[in-house]
Image: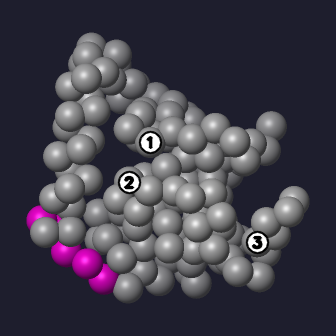
Amino acid sequence: MSAAVIFYDSSCVLCSTFVRFIIRHDTNSHFQFAALSSAYANSLQLPKESVVVVIDNKKLLQHYAVRYIISKLPKLRWILFFFWITPKPIQKWMYNIVAKNRKRIFGSTQCALAQEYKSRFISQDNYHPNS
């Protein structure tokens, strides 16, 4: 199975911190990353205000992306219990609240993760829209 790609808002402190957290706990290197402002994200016409996971270049997960991400991090799978006991409409509502207010609460910055972890990020150099 090919790696899943996590698209994130590279100007959001919360999003960048979450990506750093994923990289630290993704012992199987299941995930690659790309900014929502990248050419790759634009080619897929992804929403700009959400974490999006693309699996095998076709499946898009938005509101439940965090649950999917946690399910692929071996040492953190126990957290799925909280997703299991929380109804999906409440999860979606909570996600939307955080997504709408994240920059106001956590701030914005220029993300340097793509330079720090080059092998895990899809850049303009290794993006090929027809592949």
Instruction: Determine crowd level at label 2: few under 14, some 14-19, many 20+ residues with C-alpha closer than 10 A.
Output: many
Q: Quadrant of residue 40?
A: bottom right
Q: Position of residue 18 (x, y in %)?
A: 38, 58
Q: Which residues are magenta?
A: 105-109
Mark 2 and 1 residues: CB-CB less than 8 Å, in contact? yes
Residue that numbered label 1 is attached to: 62
Q: Position of residue 3 (x, y in %)?
A: 72, 47
Q: CA distance from mark 3 to mark 2?
A: 21 Å
6 lies left or right of 17: right
Q: Is residue 33 shown above or below 71?
A: below
Residue that appears at 26% across and 41% down: 95
Which amino acid is tagged 3?
Tyr
Residue that numbered label 3 is attached to: 127
User: Quick one: SS at disc 1?
Assistant: loop
Residue furthest out toward the left: 105
Mark 1 and 3 residues: CB-CB less than 8 Å, in contact? no
Q: Is residue 77 shown above or below 46?
A: above
Residue that appears at 26% across and 16% down: 87
Residue that numbered label 2 is attached to: 50
Q: Quadrant of residue 66?
A: top left
User: Quick one: SS at disc 3?
Assistant: loop
Q: Earlier in the sequence, mark 1 or mark 3?
A: 1
Q: How is the image coloured?
A: one colour
Residue that appears at 50% across and 34% down: 68
Mark 3 and 2 residues: CB-CB less than 8 Å, in contact? no
Which is more toward the observer, 19 or 38? 38
Q: Is residue 80 shown above or below 123?
A: above
79 lies left or right of 125: left
Q: Position of residue 90 (x, y in %)?
A: 21, 25
Numbered marks: total: 3
